[in-house]
């Protein structure tokens, strides 16, 4: 590592026993607790050979999170950005796909000077160089590294080795290992059990890592007896055994960790001081626990079976829920049911106070979504369209207001005579699927006096994008002349970024994904507006 003025401290979060225990939340929560005075920079290490998750099926892997710089990354980055209030970069998500690509490039270039290229030192050194590069570029005080997968997985062995070596590279006092494990309470036994923790710590130690802190995920707070047992068998202080209790809302985890004393342990071990500031955070969470009423918001989609595929939308709504002190019930609507005449739109939207048509790809369910949008437009039901949602709102408007009855997106019907939504010219030649969409944050110029302008409180909005199709510029005039407000345009005036309707309670759509930047303390403006209207008119 190059010499730096300040000493880098690294916290490594590993997981044991099984996946899905909430390592991302644990890492983000620790980061949140330390970030009052220190610059905390997260990294996530994924073992898979895909370069990024951009081409993976959201049903299997959850939502693809998009960063300002256009990086398509693991959805844990959503937690990091929301809990830490930071903007992450693509290089903070390391995948084995990226690592091997780079090693191969270096080998072909001759960088290894005739040596045999080996996992250790070459691949492991490359992984470590990524830690140091990110820390330096981001001027990190603390680097939090979340190791994907579970200790013992073949695909994470090289990452573990890299993390083990950090202690020697940086000095014992600058590296802290946190291990998240599972403490079950088997039915019939009704007792917290430590054996899985003991075994997974054993696996970790076989790889040369002794945890400093153990977080036991458990349906209940860990009792004194189990803490003692884990401390004895796993060689940690009893105070360093922390309850990772099941919660109804994961935003409570930083508060729980703090109460369990994790900050003192980390401060002591790393010789740092950055007292947590949880006041505003706790107050907003209290609002969630004591709502003044409830409303139902419908989400119409294709991946509605897996809530994770719309994780950031759920988050953005939860942020609004805390601000409006309203419980928001989500109703997922599978719009194919409308197409198959199983249910009517008015049946499906009964009792619903607002509708979101989120992003999506492909044809299935789109006609049903268009029927829902038509209903919202005609009945004054608050509507928010996101990405594909904007494209379908434009299609609906073109068909039923502009009278272009065959209007469509060429993504849905490549032969449509009225291609109101079309692929961007620069996208046509592209053969590769990975990382080739219009990705990342772009500036939109908002027209003064529009709803978009009011909601953002600015004539500029920077939101993140992930799409190939756009409103066709040949139709801008026709749409405008018929009353659609193109309230936000790209800087060059060619691409439609926001549309809205006048004389409607709330009808707005954007080509971007505003949900990706929503935070508990600052909900995304378009979601805030949706809930505001839903409460006002249908609450
Ligand atoms: N499928 C559409 C496109 O590629 C919309 C994508 C999205 O909703 N993210 O343009």
Image (spheres, rainbow, N blue to C red):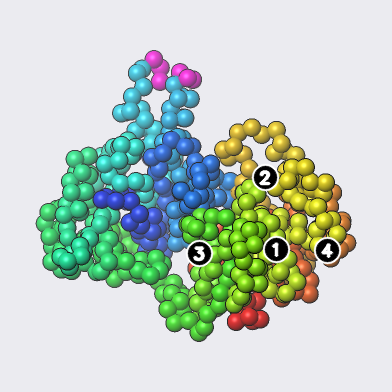
Q: Which residue is mark 1?
A: 371
Relative to 143, 260 lies left or right? left
Q: How busy is the neighbourhood of tag 3: few (under 14 within 10 Å), some, or many (20 plus)?
A: many
Q: Which x, y percent locates residue 180? A: 28, 55
Q: Residue at x 16, y 54 (%)?
A: 195
Q: Which x, y percent locates residue 424? A: 73, 43
Q: Residue at x 34, y 18 (%)?
A: 116
Q: Which x, y percent locates residue 351? A: 59, 77
**Of 104 and 484, the residue lying toward us:** 484
Q: How busy is the neighbourhood of tag 4: few (under 14 within 10 Å), some, or many (20 plus)?
A: some
Q: CA distance from mark 3 to mark 1?
A: 26 Å
Indicate the secondary structure of the residue bearing disc 2: loop
As for residue 55 lying within the magenta part, the answer is: no
Which of pointers 4 and 1 indicates the residue nearer the eye?
1
Q: Which residue is mark 2?
A: 468
> Is residue 94 visible in this depiction of the protein?
yes
Marks 4 and 2, the one that precedes in the sequence: 4
Which region shows up in magenta? Answer: 108-114
Which of pointers 4 and 2 indicates the residue nearer the eye?
4
Q: Looking at the magenta stretch, what is its main secondary structure? A: loop
- Which of the labelled discs sits on residue 139, or is there none? none
Q: Which residue is mark 4?
A: 401
Which of pointers 3 and 1 indicates the residue nearer the eye?
1
Indicate the secondary structure of the residue bearing disc 3: helix
> In the picture, which quadrant includes the C terminus?
bottom right
> In the picture, which quadrant includes the N terminus?
top left
- Whether the residue under disc 2 has CB within 8 Å of ligand 1: yes
Verify CB contact (< 8 Å) between mark 4 and mark 2.
Answer: no
Q: CA distance from mark 2 to mark 1?
A: 23 Å
């Amino acid at each position: 590592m190059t010499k730096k003025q300040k000493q880098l401290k690294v916290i490594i979060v590993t997981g044991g026993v099984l996946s899905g225990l909430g390592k991302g939340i644990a890492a983000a929560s620790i980061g949140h607790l330390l970030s009052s005075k220190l610059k905390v920079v997260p990294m996530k290490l994924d073992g898979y050979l895909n370069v990024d998750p951009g081409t993976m099926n959201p049903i299997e892997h959850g939502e693809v999170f998009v960063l300002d710089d256009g990086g398509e990354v693991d959805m844990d980055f959503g937690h990091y950005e929301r809990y830490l209030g930071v903007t992450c970069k693509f290089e903070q998500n390391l995948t084995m796909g990226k690592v091997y690509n780079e090693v191969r490039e270096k080998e072909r270039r001759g960088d290894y000077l005739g040596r045999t290229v080996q996992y250790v030192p070459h691949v492991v050194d490359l992984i470590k160089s990524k830690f140091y590069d990110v820390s330096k570029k981001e001027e990190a005080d603390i680097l939090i590294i979340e190791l994907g997968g579970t200790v013992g997985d073949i695909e994470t062995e090289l990452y573990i080795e890299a993390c083990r070596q950090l202690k020697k590279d940086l000095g014992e006092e600058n590296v802290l290992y946190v291990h998240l494990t599972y403490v079950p309470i088997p039915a019939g036994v009704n007792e917290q059990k430590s054996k899985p923790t003991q075994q997974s710590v054993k696996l970790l130690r076989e790889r040369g890592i002794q945890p400093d802190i153990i977080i036991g995920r458990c349906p209940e707070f860990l009792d004194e007896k189990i803490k003692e047992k884990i401390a004895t068998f796993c060689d940690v202080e009893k105070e360093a055994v922390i309850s990772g209790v099941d919660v109804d809302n994961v935003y409570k985890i930083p508060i729980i960790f703090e109460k369990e004393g994790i900050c003192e342990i980390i401060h002591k071990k790393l010789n740092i001081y950055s007292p947590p500031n949880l006041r505003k955070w706790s107050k907003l969470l209290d609002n969630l626990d004591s709502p003044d009423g409830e409303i139902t918001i419908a989400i119409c989609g294709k991946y509605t079976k897996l809530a994770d595929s719309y994780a950031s939308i759920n988050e953005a709504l939860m942020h609004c829920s805390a601000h409006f002190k309203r419980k928001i019930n989500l109703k997922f609507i599978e719009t194919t049911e409308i197409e198959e005449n199983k249910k009517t739109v008015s049946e499906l939207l009964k009792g619903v106070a607002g509708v979101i048509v989120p992003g999506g790809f492909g044809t299935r369910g789109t006609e049903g979504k268009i029927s829902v949008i038509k209903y919202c437009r005609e009945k004054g039901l608050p509507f928010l369209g996101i990405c594909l949602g904007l494209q379908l709102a434009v299609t609906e408007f073109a068909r039923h207001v502009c009278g272009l009855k065959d209007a469509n997106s060429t993504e849905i019907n490549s032969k449509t005579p009225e291609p109101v939504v079309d692929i961007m010219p620069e996208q046509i030649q592209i053969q590769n699927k990975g990382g080739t969409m219009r990705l990342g944050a772009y500036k939109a110029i908002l027209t003064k006096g529009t709803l978009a302008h009011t909601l953002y409180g600015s004539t500029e909005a920077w939101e993140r994008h992930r799409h190939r199709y756009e409103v066709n510029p040949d139709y801008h005039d026709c749409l405008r002349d018929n009353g659609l407000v193109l309230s936000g345009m790209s800087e060059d005036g060619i691409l439609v970024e926001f549309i809205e309707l006048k004389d409607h309670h709330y009808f707005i759509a954007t080509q971007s994904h505003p949900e990706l930047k929503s935070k508990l303390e600052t909900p995304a403006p378009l979601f805030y507006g949706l809930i505001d209207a839903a409460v006002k008119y249908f609450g």
